[in-house]
Image: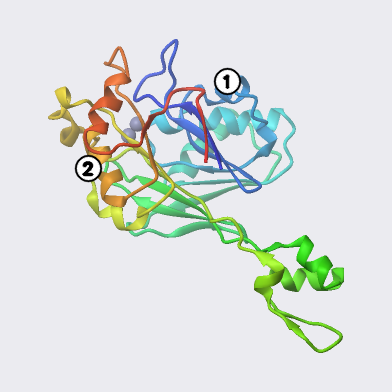
Amino acid sequence: MKLTILGCYAATPRTMTNPTSQVLEIKNHMFLIDCGEGTQVQLRKNRIKFSRINHIFISHLHGDHFFGLPGLVSTFRLLGRDKDLHIYGPKGIKEAITLLMKLGDSWTNYQLTFHELTSKNSEIVFEDDKVSVATIPLKHRVYTNGFLFREKLGERKLNIEAVAKYQIGKAHFRNIKQGTDVLLEDGTMVSNKKLTFDPPKPKSYAYCSDTGYKPDIVDQIKNVDVLYHESTFLESEALLAPKTKHCTAKEAAAIANAADVGTLILGHYSTRYKSIAPFKGEAQDIFANVELADDGKVFEF
Ligand SMILES: [Zn+2]
Ligand SMILES: [Zn+2]
């Protein structure tokens, strides 16, 4: 997986920082997660092809997470898009986007499908043979979901040398990759284990922004490879976190620690702070493997 941070700051766009948006490359998909103002420019700066984005996941309807969406939907039309576009987000998102299009008398020339979310429980919102995406219900001032992206276990890998040794023909390869044993012409059975290697371990990524401290998400995100968790505040502003339903760096680290994740990426920093470095220090008091998101930063895992 490859995660490109397009923006990871709270509230307002500034000259050097952008509100929330990121792109997750997983298997053959480019998923856009949230779409704050400036997302289009950030996509261009990071050389991400607009045409590769077919699914957009919106956590909630605060401006710093979706004000870039009407512009992007409109640009897709100007670029001559003809592929379907799927948008997943809270109920109301369809009305918001289509009202803007209606007022400007502009419609898309591609199929635009909204998948409006209302459930307070986790649900699978996207699934194919390689990937699944489930919501992570969060605790914020408006209805909000994080998203859990999981690769599925792939086919077994063919051991070319072993296959050659037993002179097994190509016609068997498809079945072998799916785990079947092979009966040779002389009547001996060759077990699948001798002919294949284990497939790579499927990776997982959890995106949790925005949210107040919500320990009950721990079960759902247990052992994920990477957790992106909002950390709007440092300890000096800890009192503001529950009031605004956001988290401190320490609270994000407590979630990462309890869920025993591989890596914690912090983001959604309040723009009041001159430096984001202290976020890492405060989180590392509780959880060691902390990375700081920043606009344009790429994480591969
Ligand atoms: Zn936000
Ligand atoms: Zn918010």
Residue 30 at least partly seen:
yes
Reading the image, the residue beneath label 1 is: 41
Rendered residue at 34%/59% (across/down): 121
Q: Residue furthest bottom?
A: 187
Element marked by disc 2: loop
Residue beneath disc 2: 213
Secondary structure type for disc 1: helix
Under mark 1, the amino acid is Val
For this view, does 35 lie left or right of residue 270?
A: right
Characterize the local packing of mark 2: few (<14), some (14-19) or many (20 or more) Cα atoms within 10 angstroms.
many
Measure the C-alpha gap from mark 2 to mark 1: 32 Å
Assess disc 1: are there few (<14), some (14-19) or many (≥20) residues with their C-alpha within 10 Å of its C-alpha.
few
- Please provide percent x and percent y for residue 285: 21, 33
Q: Is residue 195 above or below residue 98?
A: below
Q: Is residue 272 above or below residue 131?
A: above
Q: Quadrant of residue 262?
A: top left
Please name the amino acid that badge 2 sits on.
Tyr
Of callouts 2 and 1, which one flags the residue occurring earlier in the amino acid sequence? 1
Identify the residue at horizontal 69%, vertical 36% (top origin). 51
Asked where in the image residue 266 lies, by quadrant, the reply is top left
Along the horizontal axis of the image, is 89 left or right of 272? right
Are circles 2 and 1 on residues that touch, CB within 8 Å?
A: no
Can you give x and y, in whole percent of width and height, for residue 21 in the image? 47, 31
Instruction: Judge left or right: residue 218 versus residue 39.
Output: left
- Residue 84 % position (x, y): 67, 46
